[in-house]
Amino acid sequence: MKTASLTTATLALAGLCSAASATVVNRGITEAEVIAAQAGWCKALVSISQTGEKSGQPAAKALAEKVIDSAYGYQMGTVLFKPTLTTAPQTFRTTRAGALAYFVGGDSNFPKDTGFALKGWTKCESKNAAMFIAGDSATTMGNVMITDKGGNVTTVDKTWKFVKDDAGRLRIVVHHSSLPYQAK
């Protein structure tokens, strides 16, 4: 026996439901959106750093809170964040508070954090080695080059995974950062 699949359109034609009740959300991610999100992250890092220098840590913290809330997916659940310069037992920052402490310090629950974003960064650039986009998620791997006010460039290995939230905005749900391996 063959069973028929009833779609919203079929039901609407039969008068059993309103076609207006159908909600379709396209959460497909484009390469351009990912590159824009990475550039936005870099711009935000420099902005937090400059705000810290001009207006102090409290102002940088307020900006960092806004950045974290708009760029990361902590409001969606756990974010898998492994910052560059963290040590056990607080290596991983799966909470918003942990991420904020890493970026701007000042949290007694994270006493080793001095504020990575407060290091006088003047420029930040992301360069992908590869990008993998599968519908509603995108993963990137590559380098982020960050320049300090002395012109010194620090290169970090960076892996990001992005998903779209219910409003269609990209959110970072995985952020792994490490210094490149140096043979001894």
Image (cartoon, rainbow, N blue to C red):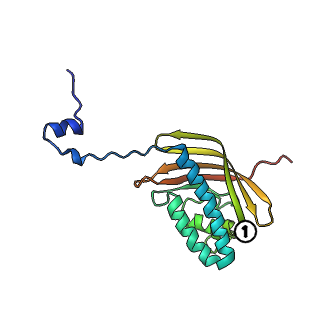
**Residue 99: % across, % down:** 59, 63
Query: Circle 1: is it few (<14), some (14-19), or many (20+) Cα within 10 Å?
Result: many
**Residue 107 makes an appearance in the image:** no
* Residue 127 locus on image (x, y percent): 67, 47
In the image, taking residue 131 as reference, residue 153 lies left or right, namely right
Q: Which corner quadrant of the image does residue 128 belong to?
A: top right
The quadrant the N terminus occupies is: top left
Which residue is disc 1 drawn over? 120
In the image, residue 6 above or below residue 118:
above
**Secondary structure of the residue carrying numbered label 1:** loop
Is residue 109 something one can see in this rendering?
Answer: yes
Q: Quadrant of residue 139?
A: top right
Kindly give the residue lying farthest to the right in the view shown: 184
Please, what is the three-letter code of the amino acid marked with disc 1? Gly
Q: Give the tally of numbered discs.
A: 1
Q: Residue at 71% across / 65% down in the picture?
A: 121
Residue in view at x 68 percent, y 54 percent? 125
Q: Is residue 130 above or below residue 48?
A: above
Residue 73 left/right relative to 115 = left
Q: Is residue 46 above or below residue 178?
A: below
Image point 70% across, 61% down: which residue? 123
Which residue lies most toward the left here? 15
- x%, y% of residue 126? 66, 51
176, 164: nearer the viewer: 164
Along the viewing direction, whichever of 11 and 112 lies nearer the viewer: 11
Q: Residue furthest top?
A: 1
- Nearest the viewer among 40 and 102 is 40
